[in-house]
Amino acid sequence: MSVVPDRPSPEPPRGPSRESQRGLDWFIFFLADVQTGFGPFIAVYLTTQKWTQVEIGFVLSIGGIIGLLGQMPGGAIVDAARSERVVAGCAVAAIGASALAYALWPIFPVVTLAATLHALASCVLGPAIAAISLGLVGPLAIGERLGRNARFASLGSGSAAALMGACGYFLSSRSVFLVTFMLAIPTLLSLARIREREIDIAQAHGEVKREVPDKRATSVVALVRQRPLLIFAGAMMLFQLANAAMLPLMAGVVTTRSSQWAPVLIAACIIVPQAIVALCSPSVGRKAQAWGRRPLLLIAFASLVIRGLLFATVRDPYLLVMVQIFDGITAAIFSVMVPLIVADVAFGSGHFNLAQGIVGTAVGIGASLSTVLAGYVSDKLGSSTAFMGLAGVAAFGLFVIWLVMPETRRTA
């Protein structure tokens, strides 16, 4: 079912070269490596540098705030660019410079500037990767390409976590950021393997060729008034409102029940979903084209509901790790579905990346509220009640998809 029936159908997908496809694969893999270095390792490193928790919290909050406010401007920048490769390359270079600043000058003004630079660069990287992917393979093949992207991102995150952990343990916490800086080099080399001439710029922005330009169809106002985009953004806000707090809340529960094994169990809870994403994401992309988008969205929300209910009732810490299988299912689906549905809805508008920013902003709002609200409910009424509440939010999102979200798959 077409979202906007009066728009022309996309051209048949072109076949990008093997070199460009592999270049994008390895670019995503190494970029995931680079981004992993800015996770929990920041707090560990700055603590060893005698920073106070207030100072560390301030630096960490910068990324969250800029990441939320910069989603739509970041997408608009990518839409306005004439070369997504250049935008992505500049962003990777900025992140590499931020990592080097952390390692060499761990003083408050420099780290604050580095955190700001990293957050700003991250706001354009997600849209740039999606735009390069769409420009290479076209709207009819984008589902499978996004599944492939998710697989390499997951493999990169998992391998980087092991590498960074080993460097931090055997060398020093500072070495994590030096390794992150060095990993920016193969990231840029992989990006250079993607042939610029094979990226259809108009296609990358969600444009289509028209004999007579239609300014109404390509206006930002027309985009933000699209009902499927607004419904999907609202559903994604509900998803993150239910999802973001589950693992942190569960980590606290595991620590109180089995403090000795808590670090190992929490690590396993992170690894299990990553493994499922790596295994399942490509098939998610193929199924999205065969089945449509709505069935997979319903499976993802249902998995989140089950996960919340199990967290509320399961008492064995080791069984909680198995519950994370449902997290892997939702992660595999949404890592593909978010840019895929946005590409469906924004087709023909020329504002594909701005539309990604709109959905990304909704995701950020949901994630920000989730930890605060779940933490408050857990403190007042207990963790089981908090998990039930999160499951209830996920159930509401399930009904939103079921009742009002239209199918956006394009078949021609």
Image (tube, grey):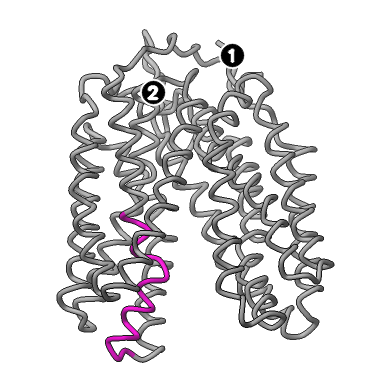
| Chief secondary structure of the magenta portion | helix
Query: For this view, does 395 lie left or right of residue 330?
Result: right
Query: For this view, does 54 lie left or right of residue 342?
Result: left
- Relative to residue 122, is residue 376 depicted above or below? below
Query: Callout 1: helix, strand or loop?
Result: loop
Q: Quadrant of the N terminus?
A: top right
Residue 2, x across and y down, in percent: 62, 19
- Specify whether residue 218 is painted magenta: no
Query: For this view, does 297 lie left or right of residue 28?
Result: right
Residue 369, x across and y down, in percent: 60, 68
Residue 151, x across and y down, in percent: 47, 38
- Relative to residue 14, is residue 118 depicted above or below? below
- Amino acid identity at mark 1: Thr
105, 152: nearer the viewer: 152
- Which label belongs to residue 411? 1
Res. 155 visible in picture: yes
